[in-house]
Image (cartoon, rainbow, N blue to C red):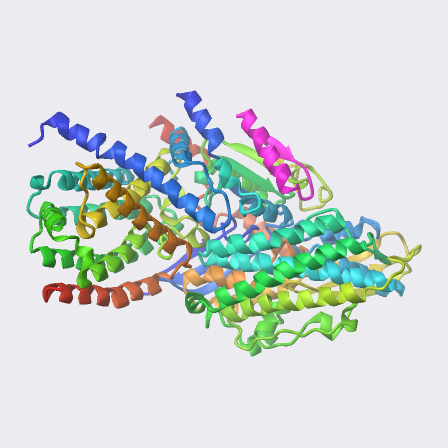
Amino acid sequence: MKRLFRWALKRSLYVYHVGASACNNCDIEILDLLTPKFDVERFGIVLVGSPRHADVLLVTGAVNKLIAPRLREVYEATPNPKVVVAIGTCPSGNIFQDSYNVVGPLDKIIPVDIYIPGCPPKPEAMIAGIVKVLEKL
Amino acid sequence: MVKEKFIPLGPYHPLLEEPEFFKLYVEEETIIDAELRIGYNHRGIEKMGESKTFDQVPFLVERICGICSTSHPLAFVLAVEDLAQIQVPERAQYIRTIMAEMERIHSHLLWVGLAGHFLGYNTVFMWAWKAREPLLDTCELMTGNRNHYAMMKIGGVRRDFQPQKLETLKEVLSEIEKFTTMITHAVIDDPVFHARTKGVGVLTKQDAIEMGVVGPVARASGLAIDVRKNQPYAAYDRITWNVITQESGCVFAKAAVRLLEIIESIKIIRQCIKNIPKGEIEIEVREIPAGEGIGLAEAPRGEVFHYVRSNGSNYPERLKIRAPSYMNIASFKRTVIGEKIADAALITAAVDPCYCCTERMGVINKQTNQVMLDGSELVRLSQLKTEEVRKKLKCT
Amino acid sequence: MFDILEVLFLYLVFPGFLFSAVVGLLSCWVDRKVTAKVQWRVGPPMLQPFIDIIKLLGKEVILPRGAYKFSFFFFPLLGLAGITLVSTMLWIFNVFPDKTFIGDLIVVLYLLMLPPLSLILAGFASKNPLATLGASREMKLMLSYELPFILAIFTIVAKSHSLLMGNMVTVQSTQGMYLLSASGIIAFIVALICIQAKLGFVPFDIADAEQEIAGGIIIEFSGALLAIYKLTKAIMLFVLPVFLITLFLGGINVFTLWGIAQFILKYVIILTLIVVIKNTNPRLRIDQALRFFWGKVTVLAVIAMVLALVGW
């Protein structure tokens, strides 16, 4: 039974996108994944509107003070099993890390399963990253 | 008895790519008051700018916003060039113009798609983004990245455009022109689109002046303000083009302005490609003298303003940025009251707000920061659940 | 009559839960695939809806803080049970028209109201402001579409002079389908528009408008609850067209291959119509939808009714 669920999970990822003080670029590239050129729905990946529905949290941006508690709450609102993907360079320390308002790196706030670096990562790189997530599940 | 409740719009809301928080006070489905909380995206860029060298700052301000990633560095280098009285080579001016207009086209196309998405026209969303894709690929071909081009540099631009790449750009432009004309006819002439957008979220000319809005939002309210025309930079004064305005100030007018601006931008790039001179693309800048300078650039969302003060060292002493959305979001309160909740999202979207651009107001943010972190007065969104509840559920 | 085992089989396996769910999920795939094609995309693989359901069943279910536990878990199940019963009944009346009973049409109409009603209650039970808003929108939407929907259905009652669904099927099999008359076609159009709203598809996806209120009613549903919601929607996507076929398009003849082929053809045509409407329209506002249903659509339905009464 567990193996069946895991099999299904790998083929049907519901993704929730969390922008944690990002510059918008990764966020737009994530949306790009849904559009005709990349069309990740082919692999059963769907963007959902509520963390309650999600399997994967895509987190972008350098986490600032204001967003950190929300981020934790979103993480807790997501039902298990869940995966956190850090998109872009920002969540793992970057040009913004010296700022007074950035509490940064993401893994200090919530556990991160996989990092996809790039500024912004190309959509192809994100797909490759998600495939790596699948292997981890 | 008036039954009041408030609907939180954000901080995480599917219609917004970025976190922000609107409190809408509603009576039934009608909005009677609105409140905006920002600060979810504040990264302290202005302060950080003071600890980076002049050569590094364009890299930093580029990351203010992923969409306006030409306008911000452009405004910054214009400010520094104003400060140091640097004359930029002609070819670089044209390259800057081309980059800025490419950015405008892809930003407006993105907006067209998102507007369709908010209206529930997902087909329009997909089409607009598909049309945008070749342009991004061309950007990658010409600059090496789909976004964040790193083209701007004090004294010129970083990379030259080879003639064959400009040819590719020309081809892509005619594709986009075809699409824009198609979408203008298909969507703007659609009766349902009219019903949803005409007369909705009107910002009158008087309000527009009072709120000091800029960019397409102002132009949709009949104010013909455009930095490119009023205070030309780069190569805009050597090119013929029109400032697009609409009178009504409603969501429909804002959409019309953006769609027509895409066509204007295509016109501008074509002229640039035709007239671009040969020559150097940068001059060497050794010293930045002490002094102050300002740079203005017209981003897709309106006027970007950068102020730089230097004390003669390698680092700017003060960097001040004003992004267009900061002015435009404020108009939200004027436009949204009295409208239906269902229209709130659309009205917000019509402004094309860009929070990552806006979030730099240190003091205000700090204040909101403290208030927000207390958080007790906030009605929690669905997302905000705690571990205890889950534990309770498990044991019962 | 049927004995208990037969009833269980009819309800749970064929033509009830299992069958309806499988066909419904396949229809969901058709919907998603056609949508993708319209948007110049490739779309998901055929088994995607099934995989989604399996996955959701394996996920954790979270009870939101402050939610009413019983209502939150019970009502989605009630909706699913109701719609499954409709499916079972429809098939029985089509296959064995003599099993019909007086007022069965009214029972079916009531049961069709069950899924939206139970979702409204579950939405309120979740205590989320956005879900509450979604539930109140769904309620207004229900109020608006039920009137023309029932008028359209009673056009058929007026034509067949009976409330027996079995009768309607038999009459149509001898006298040709009701669609082929002036009143029939108008009533069919009205019913089709109402079904679009019952399914919660664009332009009437006001209640779970993802861009406006973040999924509305279902915002708090996680894991198995979401799976139940999706199953209910999928079965509705199957049952409502079958309902239309039974009333307007001459029912289903399962005893000949040609009859089955005809049914599949009719079903696919209706499904395509629904999906195309969904993909070519933007969402209406709730007040616009209300005006639309109580204005134009109700007028159309009344015209159909009058035409049926004068015998067209």
The total number of labels drawn is: 0
Q: Is residue C73 visible?
A: no
Residue B180 is situated, as x and y percent measured from the top left of the image, at 58, 63
Q: Foreground residue, B15 or C294?
A: C294
Residue B162 is situated, as x and y percent measured from the top left of the image, at 81, 54
Q: Residue at x 81, y 59 (%)?
A: B77
Residue B186 is situated, as x and y percent measured from the top left of the image, at 49, 64
Is residue A114 located in the magenta-colored stretch of the structure?
yes
Q: Is residue A40 visible?
A: yes
Q: Residue at x 60, y 69 (%)?
A: B260
Could you say which quadrant of the image residue B300 lies in? bottom right
Q: Foreground residue, C233 or A80?
A: C233
Is residue C156 located in the magenta-colored stretch of the structure?
no
> Is A104 left, or right, of C177 in this rendering?
right
Q: Foreground residue, B207 or B91?
A: B91
Look at the image and give the residue range highlighted in magenta. Answer: A109-137
Residue B69 is situated, as x and y percent measured from the top left of the image, at 70, 54
> Is C127 left, or right, of A115 in this rendering?
left
Could you say which quadrant of the image residue C282 lies in? bottom left
Q: Foreground residue, C157 or C225?
A: C157
**Vertically, is C174 above or below C1?**
below
> Is B331 left, or right, of B390 in this rendering?
right
In which quadrant is the C terminus of chain C drawn? bottom left
**Vertically, is B205 above or below B191?**
below
> Is C270 left, or right, of C252 in this rendering?
right
In which quadrant is the N terminus of chain C drawn? top left
